[in-house]
Amino acid sequence: MQRILDVRGNKTDQGTLKIHAPDGRVLSLGKGPPEVAVEVSDLRAFLRALTSPGLRIGEAYMDGVWQPLKSDPATDLMSVLQVGMGLTRGLPVPGGTLVKRLKKRWKRLRAGLHERNNASSSRRNVAHHYDLDHSLYAAFLDNGLFYSCAYFRDPDMSLEQAQQAKCAHIAAKLDLRPGARVLDIGCGWGGLAIHIAEHFADVHVTGITLSVEQLAIAQQRVRERGLESRIELRLEDYRDTPGRFDAVVSVGMFEHVGRPQFAPFFERVRALMKTDGTALIHTIGRSKPPGVTNPWLAKYIFPGGYIPSASEVLSAIEPSKLVCSDMETWRLHYAFTLAEWNRRFQLQREVFRERLGERFCRMWEFYLQTSEASFRWGHMVVFHFQLLREQTRLPLTRDYLYASSSSGASGHSQSRVS
């Protein structure tokens, strides 16, 4: 039960941050437990970063301006992030409520402009993150190369087992029939397509991606398994995909769509589905009202990306005339996934420090651990939106999902409401 218990407490709006300056002074922010400590190489630069923590704290960490106090074994980056998140929630906004509202509206307007992801900007944004050195991803992902939240049906599962459990759960929601044609939007390194082809007879999967590097490796993995007749992978934007499919699935791609494209995305999903088709959208989400993308993540990790609230997704689904037949929220699953990714990355950190530099490694570990912190103590979750064109396509209850997953690999179903 280690993963269930190791959540380091609940989020808190209190805590104490001790700042050890180069001249020996120790400054204190906040009050009460828990208490953590950082050492800074440039006090002015660190205090300046605190004036715009969403962007500058991460940049200051990348530049080596601050780090957890080495002489304090109880302090690590995650414990600093836990206290730091609590302290930033309590910061007053200069100018009061009106200024706060105006700033929020301006940030959302500016963010919306950055999220207008047309075909060319989408390819550029994907290349920024997914066309990095493949050995980096191979070092910390599972052996199936799944770069999305795993599903820990059992807290003692390995990462490999939890990623396969995720695939089985998604496949069950798609309710695949013999001979089904499946479209995987944002297929990554082909993990889900391979899982479906290996577990479902007579099913054909078309996977599309905008990443040149991912496509080459995914195609190689398909060839190695002799699945060329069952899986077709293409460098293609979903807006250009022809034909109709029995099932449409997207895992970890919707975060890159951007709010201006939400409604057109679901219209396109509907157009790609056969009348009796199913669809499953797996996306990171926020369990609070709409917001803005963290500026550090937008600059260094996911340009053009946006994490939606449930209300934003549902309001985009409704005009498409699709039926949201089921919605599921995963809570700590991604925290567990990210913790394991970081553990594996740290085992190879020295290799990547020599290859990519210390600043890159600090950026990457800050990305992984701040993301984990957001799922542990922030408002980040994972949503599943199951969609239909015909509301009679699936059974009225969820029983069929667990009947198929409990028997191992999901079997074909002919279920529908008559």
Image (cartoon, rainbow, N blue to C red):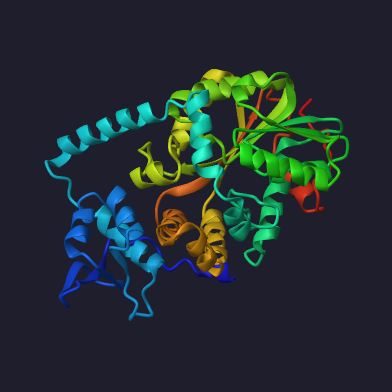
Q: Position of residue 102 (x, y in %)?
A: 20, 32
**Number of marks:** 0
Q: Position of residue 3 (x, y in %)?
A: 56, 67
Residue 64 picture quarter: bottom left
Looking at the image, can residue 199 be seen? no
Q: Nearer the viewer, residue 42 or 158?
A: 42
Q: Nearer the viewer, residue 179 or 205?
A: 205
Q: Nearer the viewer, residue 247 or 241?
A: 241
Q: Quadrant of the C terminus?
A: top right
Q: Residue at x 27, y 53 (%)?
A: 89
Looking at the image, can residue 237 be seen? yes
Taking the image as shown, residue 282 lies to the left or right of residue 274, namely left
Q: Position of residue 153 (x, y in %)?
A: 66, 57
* Above-or-below relation of 386 to 9: above
* Above-or-below relation of 415 to 27: above
* Above-or-below relation of 94 to 150: above
Q: Residue at x 57, y 65 (%)?
A: 344
Q: Nearer the viewer, residue 223 or 148?
A: 223
View extreme (front): residue:
354
Q: Residue at x 56, y 60 (%)?
A: 341
* Above-or-below relation of 43 to 199: below
Taking the image as shown, residue 287 lies to the left or right of residue 190, namely left
Q: Residue at x 41, y 49 (%)?
A: 379
Q: Quadrant of the N terminus?
A: bottom right
Q: Position of residue 129 (x, y in %)?
A: 51, 43
